[in-house]
Image (cartoon, grey):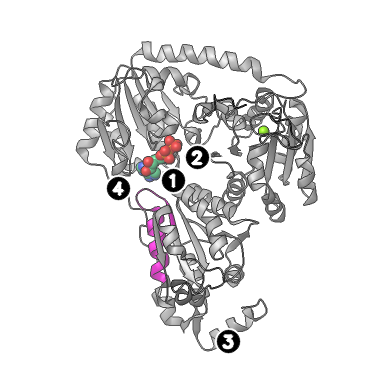
């Protein structure tokens, strides 16, 4: 359908009291309070985007589907409503699918809606335009996948997708809408009646009372207890209940990276600056919305001290998460809000705080580590290193705690995670469970669109490259996003040379002194080039004051990074020398 006959079709349909697939999809989303679509237009969904805009939805068009998908997943994380990503068939679908799989891995609710080609031709493999059996491909990579063939089933299809995305452990859902569906018409009253407003899409899941008693008994027995808060706890939006529980228990806590700020990072019970000590020494560890995956060394090995010396309590909505890596002595299966509320009640007012030799030992280690770090943060040398640049950004975030921090890279990620304190819940968005590059601009755009807050995206130069073209999207929608590119001329470092001595440069280096700031200016955004911490501070403060789309090209010493940041152990290196 061409753009010219949108209005025509619309009025014609109204005069005959007809509706069609396009309008039913839009009405079904709106009925369920979903008012934003992230996507890339094209066949067969171009008119869906146009009509959605006509019907009052916010439609944010990207340059590549993966970033639209990442935006949708972050929208889901921030709002507890499934973020919608809309793509064309085959290649557009596949681009969006990466983000859908990532959303599922991270337990973010999202729905990927893709147009698809004609079933009859696809199934007989007769070579349709963008032919692909999208439903079959999506299925193993997401939480649920559905296809709607008839206009009267759109309401049910959308309802199932919403419920699947947000109930229980949240995740990604694929909704396949073949091109033919959009043009199908039906009586508009029957159409409205076919829509479904989902009641209680993510019902509370109350924990068994005996699981609460068991968990508190294990916690009470601890001499060196530790709480680990994960991004599931941040997602749950029960911030006060979590704070009450942590403070009532008096137990030191570690926030996983996206759980930073659930309690402010300068909270006296935070053990963030004594991470290795507490992981090694704790005798009881209580996981709240955090998984014992690679990010926590699977709960075993050197990081965790003596094998078998620890007991775990785990609060999670997903029963099958229990015992996934180590024995869980006290599983609490339920939603975090209901579970911690029960615990807060059962603990009463006389709950004994953990032994002071434990909390004192942690405080001592924190003091030493924080003093060590502080000395590196304040310097104005040229070029900057990671510490001096991040020291400047740390101060800015402290002064502007509502700013949403987006962070990706290798060294840029690792250092920023420990250096930049976060003061409020859901203010830090990063590479998540897979540790992937490429989430930056999608996350920044969704954060700005969904919250209206200022966004500060701290990006390694390599990480930025994965989604860099979306700066045009940021400028087009005039979003209050300030991107700081940590430019050290390459991946990990900028100093590698081609070991074979040929004309090509080493695979890990980029064009030296690249002017990422000029890219931003090309789209009428603000570009700044800075070489010292003072210049960086000034440029970022200006951006956050003005709210103008800004890219600050921050020149970092090209020798400063280390191989693979802090996860070099995961990157196999050859010891074989070939002659
Ligand atoms: P992190 O990477 O921060 O450790 P993970 O993504 O590994 O966090 O873990 C998040 C966990 O939170 C998942 O196991 C998920 O099932 C759980 N979860 C998500 N939402 C809720 C909720 N409302 N109540 C309980 N658990 C939840
Ligand atoms: Mg770099």
> How far, Cα to Cα, is label 1 from label 3?
45 Å
1 or 3: tag closer to the N-terminus: 3
Q: Which mark is residue 205?
A: 4
Determine which quarter of the picture holds residue 341: top left
Residue 207 visible in image? yes
Instruction: Measure how far apart labels 3 and 4 are at the Cα level.
Output: 47 Å
Establish whether ligand 1 lies closer than 8 Å to the Cβ of label 2: yes
Q: What secondary structure is found at the residue carrying circle 2? A: loop
How busy is the neighbourhood of tag 4: few (under 14 within 10 Å), some, or many (20 plus)?
some
* Cα separation between marks 1 and 2: 9 Å
Residue identified by numbered label 2: 432
- Residue 510, percent across and down? 72, 37
Residue at position x 28%, y 21% from top?
308
Q: Residue 544: which disc?
A: none
**Span of residues in magenta:** 155-173
Circles 3 and 4: CB atoms closer than 8 Å: no
Q: Can residue 298 be found in the magenta stretch?
A: no
């Amino acid at each position: 359908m061409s753009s010219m006959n949108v209005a025509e079709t619309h009025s014609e349909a109204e005069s005959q009291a007809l509706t069609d697939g396009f309008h039913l999809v839009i009405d079904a989303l709106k009925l369920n309070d979903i008012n934003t679509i992230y996507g890339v237009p094209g066949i067969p969904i171009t008119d869906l985007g146009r009509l959605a805009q006509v019907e009052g939805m916010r439609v944010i068009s990207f340059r590549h589907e993966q970033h639209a998908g990442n935006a949708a997943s972050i929208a889901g994380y921030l709002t507890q409503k499934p973020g919608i990503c809309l793509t064309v068939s085959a290649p557009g679908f596949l681009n969006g699918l990466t983000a859908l799989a990532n959303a599922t891995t991270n337990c973010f609710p999202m729905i990927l809606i893709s147009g698809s080609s004609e079933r009859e031709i696809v199934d007989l493999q007769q070579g349709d335009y963008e032919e692909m059996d999208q439903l079959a491909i999506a299925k193993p990579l997401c939480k649920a996948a559905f296809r709607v063939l008839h206009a009267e089933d759109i309401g049910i299809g959308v309802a199932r997708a919403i419920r699947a995305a947000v109930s229980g452990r949240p995740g990604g859902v694929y909704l396949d809408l073949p091109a033919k569906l959009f043009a199908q018409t039906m009586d508009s009253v029957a159409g409205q009646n076919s829509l479904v407003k989902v009641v209680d899409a993510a019902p509370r899941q109350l924990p068994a009372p005996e699981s609460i008693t068991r968990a508190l008994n294990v916690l009470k027995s601890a001499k060196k207890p530790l709480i680990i808060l994960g991004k599931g706890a941040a997602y749950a939006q029960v911030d006060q209940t979590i704070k009450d529980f942590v403070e009532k228990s008096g137990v030191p806590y570690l926030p996983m990276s996206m759980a930073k700020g659930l309690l402010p990072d300068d909270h006296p019970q935070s053990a963030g600056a004594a991470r290795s000590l507490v992981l090694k020494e704790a005798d009881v560890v209580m996981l709240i919305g955090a998984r014992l995956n690679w990010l926590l060394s699977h709960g075993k090995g050197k990081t965790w001290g003596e094998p078998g010396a620890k007991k775990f309590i785990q609060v999670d909505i997903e029963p099958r998460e229990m015992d996934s890596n180590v024995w869980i002595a006290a599983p609490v299966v339920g939603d975090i809000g209901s579970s911690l509320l029960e615990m807060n009640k059962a603990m009463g007012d006389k709950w004994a705080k953990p032994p002071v030799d434990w909390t004192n030992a942690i405080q001592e280690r924190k003091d030493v580590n924080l003093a060590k770090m502080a000395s590196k943060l304040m310097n104005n040398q040229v070029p900057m290193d990671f510490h001096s640049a991040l020291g400047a950004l740390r101060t800015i975030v402290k002064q502007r705690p509502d700013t949403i921090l987006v962070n990706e890279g290798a060294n840029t990620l690792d250092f920023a995670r420990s250096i930049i304190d976060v003061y409020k819940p859901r203010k830090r968005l990063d590479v998540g469970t897979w540790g992937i590059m490429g989430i930056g601009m999608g996350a920044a755009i969704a954060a700005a669109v969904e919250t209206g807050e200022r966004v500060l995206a701290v990006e390694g130069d390599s990480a930025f490259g994965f989604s860099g073209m979306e700066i045009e999207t940021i400028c087009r929608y005039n979003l209050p996003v300030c991107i700081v590119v940590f430019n050290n001329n390459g991946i990990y470092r900028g100093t590698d040379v081609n070991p074979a001595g040929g004309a090509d440069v080493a695979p890990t280096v980029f064009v030296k002194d690249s002017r990422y700031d000029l890219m931003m200016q090309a789209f009428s955004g603000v570009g700044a080039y800075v070489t010292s911490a003072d210049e960086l501070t000034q440029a970022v403060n200006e951006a956050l004051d003005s709210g103008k789309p800004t890219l600050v090209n921050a020149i970092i010493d090209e020798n400063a990074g280390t191989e693979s940041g802090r996860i070099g152990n995961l990157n196999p290196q050859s010891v074989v020398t070939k002659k």
